[in-house]
Image (cartoon, coloured by chain):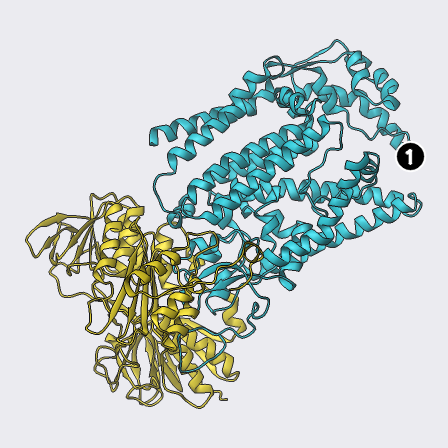
Chain colours: A cyan, B yellow
Amino acid sequence: MRGIQGIGLVLFLVGMLVFTALPFLSSYRLTEAMVQDQVKEIHREKLVELLQPMYGQSYPSTHAFLSAYSSNFDPYNEELKAKQAWDQVIWDDYGFALAKAAGEGPARAHPWTSLALSIGLVVLGGVLFQFAGSGSAHTSLAHTGVFHSSLKNRGVLGMLTGTYLIGFYVILYWFPAYLSPLVWMVEPIAQFLSGGPASQWFLYGLVYTLAIGVMGIRMVLKYRDNKYQQLRTASVVFFQTAFAFLIPEVLVLLNKPYFDFKNIWPLDYDFFYDYQIDTFISSGGLGLFMLIWGILLIVIGVPAFTYFYGKRWYCSWVCGCGGLAETVGDGFRHLSDKSLKAWQWERWMIHGVLALAVVMTTLTIVNYFSSFSLLGQVTNQLHSFYGFAIGSAFAGVVGTGFYPLMGNRVWCRFGCPLAAYLGLVQRFKSRFRITTNGGQCISCGNCSTHCEMGIDVRAYAQQGQNIVRSSCVGCGVCASVCPRGVLKLENGPEEGRIHEFPILIGNDSIKLRS
Amino acid sequence: MSSRHFVIIGNGISGITFARHLRKGDDQARITVISGESPYFFSRTALMYVYMGQMKWEHTQPYEPHFWKKNRIDLKQAWVKSIAFETKTLFFDSGEKLSYDVLVLATGSKPAFFGWPGQQLKGVQGLYSKQDLETMEAITSQPMERAVIVGGGLIGIELAEMLTYKKIPVTFLVRENRFWEQVLPESEADLVQKHIREHAIDLRLGTELKEILSDAQGNARAVVTTAGEEIPCGFVGIATGVTPNVDFLKNTALAIGKGVKVNSYFESSVPDVFAIGDCAEFEKPPGLGRKNLEQVWYTGRMHGETLAYNFCNTPVTYQPGVWFNSAKFFAIEYQTYGWVSPEPVGGVHDLFWQHRDGKVSFRMSLDQEGKVLGVLNLGFRLRHEFFDRAIREKWSGAKVMQELGKGVFDPEFYTPYHLDIQAAYQRQFGGAIVSSKKSFFQKLFGASQ
């Protein structure tokens, strides 16, 4: 089995290498027709003119191509900005679209082969590695060694992985042109699913879904004796694959709006943006249904499900961010900060983001109904600030890139406004709690150590107190690592859910608070 | 309320529980906790997880350093050399001294060694303290062909699990004819022994240690059993129980037996000196079927709670409730509530059920009238509150079975073993068990039973 595991690892690494190398194997040759094709009508004439010097030239790298593009295009925009002719400035970034159109290289020439040798090998190697490496260890012994691991305990491998992930997200959000060769290799899949071209987001969605799938297999093997873990893993894999990835693409194929039916405002922060609302309203019955469905989830779905099951119904059973955290991020869960200080930061930050999202959305809606007479410019700036700082930098770069540094739930714990909303319901009006088993706790600390949300579970368990915390996503790992059978996730009557004065069973001399 | 100076020797679960509860009840008291072992309270039970890379040392500490300052509990890291009871003064190794008004001894235990030749060699040790963990980490980081563990109890099996993590082959010597004979009935011991052997442990039952052999540098190189077999090894884990850590108190005014002699108020023979936890030896057992020495985590905590209560209220005697305990043998969890005898006892009827995979079992002991005395379960979890009540209220076996669904503490979606157990009860004792089944919708919305 070790041999097969080794082969898996080699295949995985070769795949990663090919994936990383492909963007460097591309060259570029731009033609006027490409510009005509890729640029919006209002900018077309100007860009065709500005990019004149590039036509027919060959650029050996993405960097060279983008540099040439900038040196031809930027002065024009800068001049307009200097004159404060804001309405004439071209805000659209055509870098990615033009790079994709002009690119030449192995990924474009042989998309299937490139895909097989990169993502294909990564998936195959990953699956082999998981199956061969799963051994026969029982679930409850599956957490040994994490602090002796370079990858899982902020060693060199952890730092390298973190750096790679951070780099990937920075490029994805702000320099997507560099990914255009990789986008070419998923072009045939996008054409098949949606009938349209692939974007960097399609590439990202595919990679994301495959990552959850492969690491979902790891979860099912790791927790082979734990049906709760297996079921919720199957659930997140299903919701990611069907709801987040396939259905939206098929909707596009059917000429309907791209829509993820399980994404909920305020995580889905642009749900109420004017262009979204316009899309819903202009897309007939289905569009209207999407709008109403989205609103129902916010006002009825979240409170009702959270009342019965706690926020776990979303965060560790449905959500895509949660799905990635619980599969790809599982090996990093113990890196979350458990200190009181971190909890204080957490409460300010996550509720701050929620407040920001609410203010921004309120402004957006008011503006929509007042035809942008009120604060149109401020709203636009708020949108771009939120999109940059929260939507991209926090949720993406920090949220996932920091897995090997700060654990797998950084975004969910400190930033997600939907988690904040779900958490408020969970804390104040829910039947969910983690029950502690009388006096059986031995304060060993496994629960706190392996809590991805940084909850000091032991602080409650050792005084016989139910754990009722807004941040708990109900992953169930505390109950799994507990060596004394002390913790159980339960939905039950609200009465007695929060123990103000917990009593540890077993001492008849006195009955006192712990 | 007082501004007396309470000095506690020992920062384990007993001493720390006492200090915390005293602070809750008495805002004025000056509280000092002394330990030479570690500056902060840590969970001894988690030592094995640090060794196995499942936790880091700081994770074993249930309270952050700022907790002690906030609660005005002074911590002093030092070893106490001697105590002058007449002047109420402690003398430290360093030559410093400290006076007290009330002294609480919570010095815990130390591994019991039984005078085997070679027991002082390097590589021979127990697993109790932070220092034990450190020496074990140092010694077992060297390559070695085998390690030997002596003693078939909870520390023994922990050591076996730890060494297995480091991929060191283990020979496990158990003097008795089954694992943890004082506690586990034969069927349960059998189940655990199979599980131990599944982990490639060379388990030797009915085998005693005779001596430990030395190499030229004074390291253990092999053990010899009483049967005369020599087993080469680089590490010898001694896990033959613990004994109160009271050597430095011997030959003083304090009455010492195995531990510090105390009454049911934890008062020692010297005024204003108390003893709690592992190091306390009760003059009379604190309850029916209980021992004079209580050396488990939970009782240490209860001693601390009770003594602190007594300083803040009208003193009460220590009265432990229904016995409970738990442990883990590799992957198999063990829990017990109430009284279950390891050997058959006249007039006591046992229901024993074992799952066909051989990893899960349940035993319930009933008295002559069919009332529940206790339960012992392996491989699944039972609810403390439920069984504490059932045993305290002397439920009939039939009633326990009837309600068993409420007594299960396994995670959601787990195999409902209680259905098999109810069927086994019916086969053995007859009668009809009508467990209230929930409808699909009741289940879906988590209606309580």
Q: Considering only vertical position in the picture, is B281 above or below A361?
A: below
Provide the residue designation for mark 1: A84
Q: Considering only vertical position in the picture, is A362 above or below B343?
A: above
Q: Position of residue B154 (x, y in %)?
A: 27, 61
Task: Say which element carries label 1.
Answer: loop
Chain containing the residue with disc 1: A
Q: Nearer the viewer, residue A403 or B282?
A: B282
Q: Position of residue A280 (x, y in %)?
A: 80, 38
Quarter of the image where one finds residue B253: bottom left
Residue farthest top in this picture: A56
> What residue is rendered at 90% in x and 46% in y?
A369
Q: Amino acid at mark 1?
A: Gln
Quarter of the image where one finds residue A176: top right
User: Position of B307 compared to B291: left or right?
Assistant: right
Q: Position of residue A142 (x, y in %)?
A: 40, 46
User: Position of B245 compared to A349: left or right?
Assistant: left
Q: Quadrant of the N terminus of chain A?
A: top left
User: Position of B380 compared to B365: left or right?
Assistant: right
